[in-house]
Amino acid sequence: MNFTDDNMKNNKITLNIDGVEINAEEGSTILETALLNDIYIPNLCYYPGLKPWGSCRLCLVENDEGRLITACETKVHDGMKITTDNPRINRVRKLSAELLIANHEVDCLTCKKNDNCKLQEIAAYLGINRDDLGSLRRKIMDIPVDDSNPFFNRDLKKCVLCGICVRTCSEVLAVNAVDFGFRGYDTKITTFGDKPLLESSCVSCGECMIACPVGALVPKETKKPAREVKTVCPYCGVGCNIYLGVRGDKIVSARGDTDNSVNKGNLCVKGRFGYSFINHPDRLKKPLIKRNDEFIEVEWEEALDYVAQKLSGYKGDEFASISSARCPNEDNYAVQKFTRAVMGTNNVDNCARSCHAPSVAGLAKIFGSGAMSNSIDEIKDASCLFVIGTNPTASYPVLGLRIIEAVKNGAKLIVADPRNINLCKHADIVMNQTPGTDVALIMGMMKVIVDEELHDQAYIDDRSEGFEEFKESLQSYDIETVESITGVDGELIKEAARTYASIKPASILYSLGITEHTHGTENVFALGDLALLTGNMGKPFGGVNPIRGQNNVQGACDMGCLPDTFPGYQKLDDPNTIERFETAWNVDLNRSKGITFPEMVMAAKNGDIKAMYIVGENPVTSEPDTENIKDAMNSLDFLVVQDIFMSETAQMADVVLPGCSYAEKDGTFANSERRIQRVRKAINPVGESKPDWLITSLIAKKMGAKGFDFKDASDVYDEVAKVSPTFAGINYGRIEDEGIQWPCHNEEHDGTPILHTEEFKTETGRAKFIPLTYRPSAELPDETYPLILTTGRSIYHYQTSTMTGAVEGLKKLYGEDYIDISREDASKLGVVADETVKVISRRGEIKPKVRITDRCRKGVVFMTFHFGESATNVITNSACDPISKTPEFKVCAVRVEKILD
Ligand SMILES: Nc1nc2c(c(=O)[nH]1)N[C@H]1C(S)=C(S)[C@@H](COP(=O)(O)OP(=O)(O)OC[C@H]3O[C@@H](n4cnc5c(=O)[nH]c(N)nc54)[C@H](O)[C@@H]3O)O[C@H]1N2
Ligand SMILES: Nc1nc2c(c(=O)[nH]1)N[C@H]1C(S)=C(S)[C@@H](COP(=O)(O)OP(=O)(O)OC[C@H]3O[C@@H](n4cnc5c(=O)[nH]c(N)nc54)[C@H](O)[C@@H]3O)O[C@H]1N2
Ligand code: SF4
Ligand code: SF4
Ligand code: SF4
Ligand code: FES
Ligand SMILES: [Mo]
């Protein structure tokens, strides 16, 4: 742990402010202490969490020697005496404030910050009025408003040069999009080259806009909400807590909740600004039945009768369902219960299959549990972070902020990614391996660790098994071999190994760069082995942490939307489990394992599966080899899709049922750190849409099933807690303010921030080393297809962009899927930026525009897969990991061709 100012704030001291004795923590400042105790001291350039700046001089106070000192910069000490208010102090403050206000365009009534402008607050406190300013007024710089950013405006005529935006962007974001420019009277906040914000490196997070004390940075959309509802962001697995602002039946704002350990008020561009899809006119509002290739709107009764009658004809293994990692736990519980108890099959899966199924399988085998072992809030205090195969500043932006905070706190950062992702700028060691070579890279690191005796033998003896056999398997990974497989310099690998093994505890953070391979589970095994070898499991700031992708993919798996586990990871192959569920649900259950999504695709094509129910997933755009998926969907007799928009998959359905979005229903999401958090209904369902759990239950009841008479979402959750010991101690009452991390076995238990502290959840209680052999990716570059294509994400769009694509501002920030090409490859191909090219693989071809980048090394190209129009997955490879059945989205061979006209 680092000894930052925060950690030193343990010793209590006493000081005297304006004659009142106050307890304070050593290390804090006078201003922090005063504000914490509800004593107002004027301040403008101070912002919680940023380093003190000391420029506005409004926070001057008098110490016991009669000196004026800045309260924001001076630390408290025991016995200190402070005066915050007397004529002398206020005279000086008033002078500073008048100078600031004189430089400030005063049109308070029309200013969007009018109700919470700090300058107004200060003027009121110091008794400054407009007349006092007349004599001081000088010509305000005539700078036009920068309205280039789709979400907020910058009006420098109102700027008081407090520097908060500059410090937020550098200290918190490490983006450095804005800075002070020019000098003297001309000083202003500017971007590199004084360009509009849109053309700068700004990532539109809006953190500076929230922090700006005056009206210089204000949102474009400023309808004041009539009420606010606390809920959870519907996008990524970080699970940021937000307040949705409601006016009438519309969502008009979103802001970060500062009172929780997950995001502490921070949000990324999607969480803060990406809410307008909720009331978008394209939302599905009524059930639709396809007749003669055309969708006809029908009433619920007709749609439910039709679905129930059709599905009754396909009971058993002719049926399969896909549940939604975007929907709350309650919706997922209903889908798997319906599949098992009503349809009589275990054919249920969710998008974790394309994502972290290798983590679930791999970590469960080594450690007995497949989830993130530690908590998001630990990241900032880590000593060493090994970030491999994830791009947190784009995919998990708020978690990315914690990594940047850790680096600022002195942590060592090792990044291993084929591309030069943003985090590389902050890393001590960067390894750009060839995609698909991680097993060799990690085995290479482990051989160095063992050869140099940096492993933790005592921990290995105490808590693991299989070490000797594993050690043998390291023999073939001498540094020269590893260097030639991975393309990473051997010395760098050694340095990374030594750093990770010697700075303790060290935490591993990873995501799809590890899992989406035909050897994804082996990659996960390798990371598990590495953490075990160095004794990093079961400790604060350590562990192996698969960052789960979707807002509730952890929950979809927790709820048993997997073909081999019931809710709470209770194994289907355990006869006791089946019997317990048969009793709980009062039905006879199918005892044979279900099949995974890629297997369903094959089974649909060969006629074994005839009907499917797809809730909140868009496989036609998200799964590899689009033609193959479309073939499968077309082969079905009957397809029901339940979505909030007419997705590419919904278009192929026989019946489309309108679910309602997270903003219109109650429920819970489990974030990446296993924290079960409350999702709250903010507005009534749009149109005639309904909560997904309710739709599924209505179908079940139409089919004559019992056990679907849930009163509300809370009632569904109570059943979850009853049937799964892992969640037994959780109910809505307990997670009203803050979520609980499972396992949580009873109502007295506070949940589990760190897994495996005492023992592992394996049969022996010990973790198992797994010996490994490197296997190359399924498709390697050759003469015809000489480039490796790897795919991933843009910060501005989410998955198949059914939601973010309906947010105009996000489309303006990133509107199509580009292909990123290195300078060398671009010049070899003779292509230039923005040129449309053909990208061809063995599966098909697409035509994206080129982006020339330093991020990709020669031979590697990168694409996002967000837009149905560009359909990146037309060319990706559907080859799967044999253990987890996760497709190899991260490696396929392609050729880029110039289009000659
Ligand atoms: N903005 C945004 N955020 C999202 C999402 C989104 O669509 N948009 N989706 C969410 C979901 S569901 C998920 S699962 C997560 C995914 O989050 P991430 O896994 O962080 O996202 P990706 O961009 O798919 O890939 C991560 C990195 O893997 C690297 N990589 C490629 N091949 C290899 C390899 O062979 N080895 C290694 N070590 N690295 C490799 C890529 O260069 C890329 O930088 O993001 C979540 N967050
Ligand atoms: N090339 C390439 N392809 C990839 C990946 C990659 O890295 N590269 N990553 C893969 C990964 S990690 C994942 S997770 C998958 C994701 O694949 P999908 O899960 O198919 O993608 P989403 O776009 O999230 O689809 C979710 C659907 O749910 C709908 N929805 C949202 N909220 C609700 C709700 O409350 N109720 C209902 N009924 N519907 C709702 C949305 O409108 C959308 O149509 O994509 C995979 N595809
Ligand atoms: S919106 Fe975020 S990235 Fe852009 S300037 Fe402000 S703090 Fe920096
Ligand atoms: S734009 Fe706002 S936050 Fe930035 S320096 Fe000006 S007043 Fe301060
Ligand atoms: S980091 Fe993830 S959960 Fe947080 S606001 Fe952004 S998308 Fe939402
Ligand atoms: S708040 Fe202390 S100098 Fe500005
Ligand atoms: Mo994912």
Image (cartoon, rainbow, N blue to C red):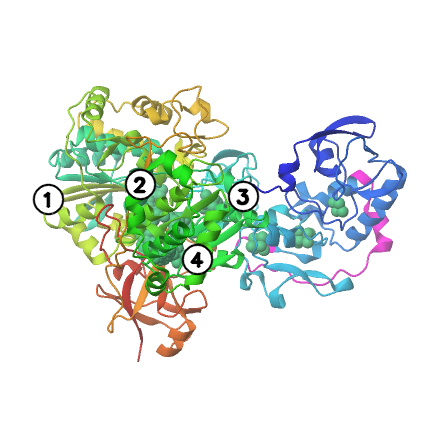
Task: Answer left or right for 703 relative to 465.
Answer: left
Q: Check residue 380 in the rendering and tell me which mark sits there, or answer none.
A: 3
**Looking at the image, which residue is at 51% across and 56% down?**
427
Q: Which badge, 4 or 3, is on the more N-terminal residue?
A: 3
Q: Position of residue 283 (x, y in %)?
A: 36, 45
Dot 2: element: helix
- Work out how far the residue at label 3 is from the one at label 1, CA to CA, in angstroms: 50 Å
Q: Which residues are magenta?
A: 125-153
**Looking at the image, which residue is at 43% across and 27% down?**
751
Residue 135 falls inside the magenta stretch? yes
Q: Which badge, 3 or 1, is on the more N-terminal residue?
A: 3
Crowd class of label 3 (few under 14; some 14 to 19; many from 20; radius 10 Å) = many
Residue 315 falls inside the magenta stretch? no
Q: Position of residue 45 (x, y in %)?
A: 71, 48
Asked whether disc 4 touches disc 2, contact meaning CB atoms under 8 Å apart, the reply is no
Please state which amino acid type lies under the numbered disc 1: Asp
Q: Position of residue 280 (x, y in %)?
A: 41, 47
Q: Which badge, 1 or 4, is on the more N-terminal residue?
A: 4
Task: Answer left or right for 816 relative to 738.
Answer: left
Who is closer to the viewer here, 417 or 322?
A: 417
- Work out how far the residue at label 4 is from the one at label 2, CA to CA, in angstroms: 29 Å
Q: Quadrant of the N terminus?
A: top right
**Residue picked out by circle 2:** 360
| In the depicted structure, whether residue 745 falls above or below residue 402 | above
Please state which amino acid type lies under the numbered disc 4: Lys
**Residue picked out by circle 1:** 608
- Work out how far the residue at label 2 is from the one at label 1, CA to CA, in angstroms: 27 Å
